[in-house]
Each structure stands twice: as structure tokens, then as C-alpha cells.
Amino acid sequence: MSDFETDYRHAKPGQSGPGVTDYLDLDTKDETFLDATELVLNMGPQHPSTHGVLRVILKLDGEKVLGTECIIGYLHRGVEKIGEHRTYAMFNPYVDRMDYVASVSNGLGYCEAVEKLLSVEAPPRAQYLRVILTELCRISSHQVWLGTHALDIGALTPLFYCFRDREEILKIFEKYCGARLTTHAFRIGGCLYEAYDGFEQDCKKFCDAFLPKLDEYEELLTTNRIWVRRTKGVGILNPEDCIALGVTGPVLRASGVKWDLRKAQPYESYKDFDFEIPTGLNGDTYDRYLVRIEEMRQSVRIIRQAVDGLPTGPIIAKVPKVIKPPVGEVYHSIEAPKGELGYFIVSDGSTQPYRMRVRPPSFVNLQALDKMVRGLLVADVVAVIGTLDIVLGEVDR
């Protein structure tokens, strides 16, 4: 039980001392409407718009939000500690279960971190295959975000459209590695599976068909007056607050900060591709929507270049069957769909990591929620949680 809950539950009427208001660092005694009593309300952990088992304690003055606290941990599985008790190869499938709608990206970050520890580089063909699958994963993740975010605000049709088109990506994943959601697509040193017959054609076919579908998404939402009124000017986060809070990904770029690890610290073969980094101006919910829409277009652009330039050759580097990295430590991060996903690994020279830590973007970005929703209405909290695009498997780990 948090201090917030303890103080609230144990405080008596008229009692002085630390209470809910003090915990939230708010002086709201003279701000209540018609001297009404402030209300402390639980949103979740079963609330559908919290996108998982997130519990948000809201302090309200009528419909106005005075402060929030996120209670997490309902989905905690000890992934990092499991990593310290498995061999490097055995732990690889576990990372897919964190951000389970972007499992390909999770696996890429982990494999690259271990490869950096081993001083091994994946062959060029493996790098291109990884980029293609990771960008397909980015589109898939953004489609889940858009469909569910629109549903939270009251638009049902985008959910059907997004999941209809996402199915084509999942079919490519299934043909490639036999799995649709938790793919375990990559291995330390490269890729285990060669591209199947027709892989390039399927990717091109998807790209050609998807761009008109993306225009359909925008026709439904971008100028829709209900969507605009529910998102413009809602949940504003300025660049200074983003940097102070460690926010990354589309949330950071929507505030006008042009930071993308694919450009800033290129990994795999991203330096070979020409693409833009979309940014916003106002840092509100509407800008975050526009940034993610444009990111999907840029992903299509990268996929087309990678498919056209796919090199020949091996798909995996020479890696020992028993992986025992030298003593040392490494931190490696990638630009996952939700932001910077980093892995910190300490090796003691054995077959298992001595320490394993993950820097998940959903967890770090979630701390910006309180800053974004103060002064808004309860309905806006739903829109802001949706625009953060959190997955609780990644938050709790």
C-alpha cells in the first residue's frame, strides 16, 4: 500500500498532518467548487481504458483532476531476475513477453546488446532482414495503439480498420518464423530463419496496399471535429518536461524534439536508408497522433528500401554454441515503437548474465502522466493514457 493510500485511509475528518493533499504537493483548500469535498477515485486496475492492469488514483474536484498517482506491479513477473538465472540464449524468448505487441523490437534490442558484449556483428543480410521485420513490427504496434486509442475516445471504426490491416503483417511473421505475437524472430548473431519464398513480394504487396489504408485512417480522424476537440490542447508536454522526465519516442518527438536513435545512434543497417523523423509543434495528444501516423509512412519507406537492397550471404555470424561473453558490461538501446528500449547487461564470464536490467519506454513515459493531466477532466485522462501508448507487460516486467 502506498503512502498516498495510507494517509488517505487513516486520516480522520478535520485531522491535521500529512494527508492526500500534502502527498500530492497541492494546496487546493480554496480551489474546490462550491466548497465541495475533494474526491479520491480509483481508475483501474480493471478499467478498459488503462490498457492493462494499471491503477490510477485520481484526486478530483468534481470532474477536474487535481493530481494522480499510478499504482503499478499487478503484472510483475521478475523478467530481469529470470534473465540472471538463464543462459543468454535461453533468456531470448522471455523479452518478447514484455511489450507483447512489439515483440520483434524487444528481441532485436536484446540480441544486439549481447552481440555488443561478444564483439560480434550480424551479417549484412541478417541486418536488412532485421530492419524489415522490425519496421513491420513498428507499424503493427502503432496500429494497435491507433485502434484502441480511437476506441477509448469513442470511435469504433478505426479499431476494425487497424486490426484488418495488421493481420497482413502477422501473416508475414507467421510465414517467416511460425509465430504471430511472441515471435522469437532473431537469434544472437543474426537470424535463424532465412527469408521464405515470396518474402520480398509479400512485403512489397503489404506496403503498396497499406499506404491507401493509412489515408483512410486520416480521413476518419484527422479533421473529425470530435477527434480534434478531444485531442487538441489536451495533455500538453513541453520539450523541457520531456527531457527532465526521460520521455522518449513519439511522445518526445511530438513536443518538437527531433531525437530518434535510428538517426542519432544508428544500429543495424539504418544508416543505409533514407527516411525522415516526424516531429510536432504543440506536444499535445493531437500532435502525438500525427507523429505516429507519419512514422508508419516512414516505416513503409524504410521497408521498401531494405527489400530492394536486400543483400545475399549468410544470415548469422559465427557464435559459439555455449555463449560465455568476456567479463564486462554493456548498455545498448534501440528505437522501439514506444521509445528508447535499452538493455544493461553485466557479464562475469559465465554462461548467465550477472546482472540484467531493462530500460522500458512505457515505464519511463508513464511518469509523465501526472504532469499531463493536472487541470484536465476525467474524460481527458482516458485520452492521455491512450496517447502514451503504454503496455503494462513492459511497465511491470
Image: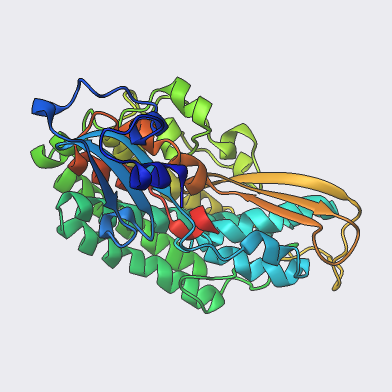
Q: In this view, does 25 lie to the left or right of 329?
A: left
Residue depicted at x 30% and y 62% = 46
On the question of residue 230 being in view, the answer is yes
Q: Percent position (x, y) of residue 357?
A: 68, 52
Q: How is the protein colored in the picture?
A: rainbow
Q: How many labels does the image show?
A: 0
Quadrant in the rendering for residue 281: top left
* Residue toward you, 87 or 124: 87
* Residue toward you, 293 or 357: 357
Q: Percent position (x, y) of residue 20?
A: 35, 36
Residue depicted at x 30% and y 41% = 12
Q: Percent position (x, y) of residue 188?
A: 73, 63
Query: What quarter of the picture does the C terminus occupy?
Result: bottom right
Of all residues, the one furthest to the bottom in this rendering is 178
Against 342, residue 140 (above or below) is: below
* Residue toward you, 182 or 22: 22
Q: Percent position (x, y) of residue 390?
A: 41, 50
Q: In this view, does 176 lie to the left or right of 7?
A: right
Against 224, residue 82 (above or below) is: below
Q: Is residue 227 left or right of residue 393?
A: left
Residue depicted at x 48% and y 60% = 393
On the question of residue 258 being in view, the answer is no
Against 2, residue 257 (above or below) is: above
Q: Is residue 230 left or right of residue 262?
A: left
Quadrant in the rendering for residue 378: top left
Against 222, residue 217 (above or below) is: below
Residue depicted at x 68% and y 67% = 82
Quadrant in the rendering for residue 293: top left
* Residue toward you, 67 or 250: 67
